[in-house]
Image (cartoon, rainbow, N blue to C red):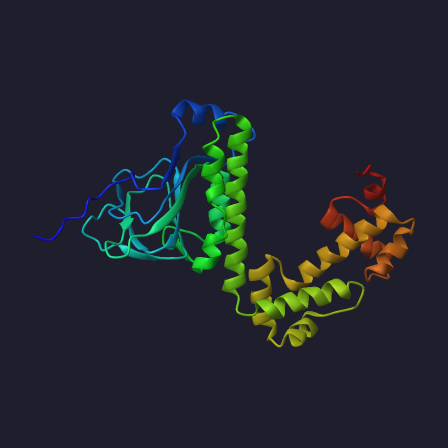
Amino acid sequence: MADVPIHRREGFSGQHLVVLPDAVARRARSGALLRGLLPTDAGMFPRAAGHLVERPAGSAATVLIVCLAGRGWFRLGTGRDAPGQPVHAGTALFLPPGMAHAYGANEEEPWSVEWAHFTGPEGAAWLQRLGVSVERPALAYSPEAAAEFGLERVYEWLERGYTEANLVSAAAALRVALAAMLRARRATADAGGDAIDASIEWMRAHRDAPVTLDALARRAAYSVPRYSELFRARTGFSPIDFLLRLRMQRACQLLDTTQLKVAAVGQAVGYDDPYYFSRLFRKIIGRSPREYRGVPKG
């Protein structure tokens, strides 16, 4: 008779597993430093044969699972007969709170996973930036990229104890991991990454030069719509809006480090009309150039 796999939630050789007690989590969420984002559970299961978790009522937290090696599966919703969707090495899986779900290791090639559960309103903003939704809960990365996310730092800090400093450090480690996913996502999502990076470097070197969107697109060898689409995917801004912010950043540096008059600062970043420069500066920075210069720095 064939062996029947033992399905379990934990208990794997070499595992790490930390779960905040409810009282600790409640106290942490009452403080300003952890209210926005709090990792409540974290760990690592190496080659987790038989791993199976079913939550018919879902979880109170967002569940993040990063598959480092092997394979697994997941299912969202209450249909236990529905086929599970596959998870491969490099996948980052986000399961939303309050939704029934199940997940487990592949029987032939069980996965190795790092994972964290987190609460707080900041979590929704991270998922939005990453493009995660109920319809698209899994993001595909290379296994090499997934290994560099650093999610292990979350459970390493929690294992040191439940002091505020350790909890804040665990939350910071989770932010670093999510930021790494965001950077890797943008680097792989836009096929024109090198061209957009080159365009950005050209902008930095020519902040004072007159330029049009058509000229920027031609330099990058794209049509204007495609160039604008790729640029926004990589930076979050339109090309001209990004250039405007580069110019205002340089203007701030000149106002802080030189005695140049406001008109000369405007000319240095490409604006001959000092009144137009001042209007743009206020729009982006929130103060006039003279007001900005008067604010103590350092």
Is 201 placed left or right of 9 in the picture?
right
Residue 34 seen in render: no
Q: Which residue lies at the image location 26% right of the left edge and 48% below the top edge?
A: 49
Is 70 placed left or right of 33 in the picture?
left
Query: Where is 204 relative to 291, above or below?
Result: below
Q: Quadrant of the C terminus?
A: top right
Is 142 placed left or right of 297 in the picture?
left
- Depth check: give the residue in front, 52 or 55: 52
Residue 134 x %, y %:
37, 50
Residue 137 x %, y %:
38, 52
Location of residue 295 by image quarter? top right
- Depth check: give the residue in front, 50 or 277: 50
Name, please, the residue furthest toward the left. Answer: 1
Residue 165 x %, y %:
56, 29
Residue 108 x %, y %:
24, 57
- Depth check: give the residue in front, 113 or 25: 113
- Depth check: give the residue in front, 230 or 238: 230
Name, please, the residue furthest toward the front. Answer: 13
Q: Which residue lies at the image location 34% right of the left edge and 39% below the top edge?
A: 98
